[in-house]
Image (spheres, helix red, strand yellow):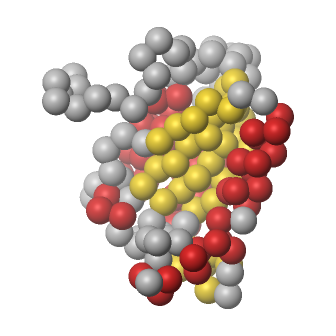
Amino acid sequence: MSRPDRQSPRLPVFDYSQAGLYFVTVCAFGRRFLFGAVMQDEMRLSPLGEVVRREWTAIATRWGGVELDAFAVMPNHLHGIVALTGAGRAPPLQTIIGSFKAGVSRRAGCSVWQRSFYDRVIRDDEELRALREYVEENPLRWALDLENPASR
């Protein structure tokens, strides 16, 4: 049950189990740098970062009707594009991401993630192209990211 003082970031009338493409961002609790570091514009995963990568890539094998597109594990967050194909009656996006987050936390032995996650429904091919580029270039932009202490 959700708390009455918190609003859900999901669109209230949108069916998140319908076929489509979704851009997702999941952040570490407190935005802690748990998943590795960007060195020379390349992400180097910590052991926990490897768990995040493995759990993310396992999504497509755990859920029918779910495919994964571009994704990037960053020092304190993950960006990914999830495709619900409509085949095999995929569960809602919230269930998929909740299961992913729980799997990582279970393997870590503690809570790893911030409450909820950010999502965006990808509406057309141009938006998909731009988001793929954003995800793939995320490590290159880390030097300028305000969350990166070295950029200040």
Q: Give how far across and how far down residue 69 sits, in percent.
A: 74, 44
Please indicate, yes or no, whether residue 109 appears anywhere in the rendered image.
no
Q: Quadrant of residue 149?
A: bottom left
Name which residue lies at 52% across and 48% down: 25
Position of the N terminus, as image quadrant, is: top left
Q: Give how far across and how far down residue 67 sits, in percent.
A: 71, 35
In depth, the one of 95 and 143 nearer the eye is: 143
Q: How many marks?
A: 0
Please indicate, yes or no, whether residue 118 appears anywhere in the rendered image.
yes
Q: Quadrant of residue 16?
A: top right
Relative placement, left or right, of 93 versus 114 is right
Position of the C terminus, as image quadrant, is: bottom left
Q: In this rendering, is residue 11 above or below 141? A: above
Name which residue lies at 53% across and 79% down: 37
Relative placement, left or right, of 16 versus 66 is left
Q: In this rendering, is residue 15 above or below 129? A: above
Relative placement, left or right, of 30 versus 75 is left
Q: Give how far across and how far down residue 21 sits, in percent.
A: 69, 31
Q: In this rendering, is residue 46 above or below 67? A: below
Q: Give how far across and how far down residue 80 sits, in percent.
A: 62, 48
Name which residue lies at 68% across and 81% down: 41
Q: In this rendering, is residue 99 above or below 110? A: above
The furthest residue to the front: 152
